[in-house]
Image (cartoon, rainbow, N blue to C red):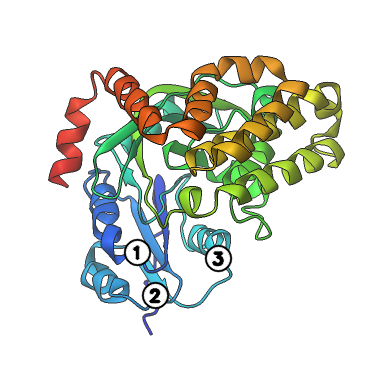
Amino acid sequence: MPTDHNLNTDHSVSVVTPSYNQEIYLQQTMESVLSQGIPGMEYVVIDGGSTDGSVDLIRSYENRLSGWVSERDRGQADAVNKGVSRTTGDVIGWLNSDDLYLPGAVNKALAYLSDHPEVDAVYGDVISIDGEGKMINVMRFDQYTLEELMSFRVISQPGVFFRRSAWEKAGGLDLSYHFMLDHHLWLRMASRGKFAYLPEPLAAARFHAEAKNRAHPEDFGKEAYRLADWLLTDPLTAERAKPIEKQIRGGAAWLDAHYLSEGGAPGKSMKAYAKAFSLFPQRVLEDKNRLALTALMAFSPDAAQKVFNKRLSKRLEGLKEYQQYLNDI
């Protein structure tokens, strides 16, 4: 059993990677972090007791890591909490073992936070890739208000960097969440501080058959509905949430519909879209292209795929340099 390395105490940024049986992707993830070229950056890998070749792989990198451990844990949230507790950086990045940082991502985030001391967390756009590293989408965001985050304008976790002070005030990740754990954290951070948007890609999120967003699409909606109830009753958020209750509950239904659509369940997705429309029609109308694609998917999956591929080509214009990086890493 490996033991934790001693960590230095003078670091500007720390990155934590939780992992479990992700040998197939883990090396690319670690390389994407280690190639950022940030002097003094801490990088800690927390393995959940993998039974594939992950431990041997991590051990082969231990001279380049600030710390690592392999032991059973209580899931992703527990692993990230454990990892953060073993680091000292003022800024923290959390990168799962099937995701990647794009070139310069950490430096861009650090520079932004240095220039904007009033900002507690910065987030950028995130490219979606498949199991082989091919770009399949790009998730572009905006400068969201707290009310928009409450209404389930979600941001992609690998593209977020936050100050340790914000993490400590929020209390880290809640171990009772397994699918919307990141959004729950962002809501607690944003309720106490300020989030800022950096309009350029910072990371790549991998979508593959074993990923939670593909393997368990229904569970995201369940936790979104639970988060809506929390927002409306928790002393931290209730005062600002109650005036927009319909938007919050409609946003949760929209998120349910979105994940069900991406998970290949168009019938269930359309029911969730209908619920979302009854509560927050504007959100559904903004997503009319995905709604139409979901409806088409129910009748002709092949036709829906053709429409998606045509739209995809346009969305990925100007991102070819990132595909080359993904091919090389």
Q: Of the residues shown, which amino acid type is indicated by label 3?
A: Gly
Point 68% across, 29% down: residue: 251
Q: Is residue 279 left or right of residue 265?
A: right
Q: Where in the figure is residue 200, as x and y percent of width and height? A: 35, 23
Residue 317 lies, with reference to residue 124, above or below; the image says: above
Q: Is residue 141 left or right of residue 236?
A: left
How far apart are the two marked residues, 3 and 2, measured between alpha carbons?
A: 12 Å
Q: Of the residues shown, which amino acid type is indicated by label 2?
A: Ser
Q: Are marks 1 and 2 in contact (CB under 8 Å)?
A: yes
How far apart are the two marked residues, 3 and 1, measured between alpha carbons?
A: 14 Å
Q: Which residue is mark 1?
A: 22
Q: Are marks 3 and 2 in contact (CB under 8 Å)?
A: no
In the foreground, 175 or 193: 175
How far apart are the two marked residues, 1 and 2, measured between alpha carbons?
A: 8 Å
Q: Which residue is mark 3?
A: 75
For mark 2, give the secondary structure: loop
Q: Quadrant of the N terminus?
A: bottom left
Point 23% across, 19% down: residue: 318
Q: Which residue is mark 2?
A: 50
Q: Where in the figure is residue 223, as x and y percent of width and height? A: 68, 48
Q: Where in the figure is residue 25, as x and y percent of width and height? A: 28, 57
Task: Please tell me how crowded label 2 is: few (under 14), some (14-19), or many (20+) other residues with Cα within 10 Å.
Answer: some
The mark that comes first in sequence, 3 or 2, is 2
Point 70% across, 17% down: residue: 281
For mark 1, give the secondary structure: loop
Point 80% across, 22% down: residue: 244
Q: Where in the figure is residue 286, as x and y percent of width and height? A: 57, 15
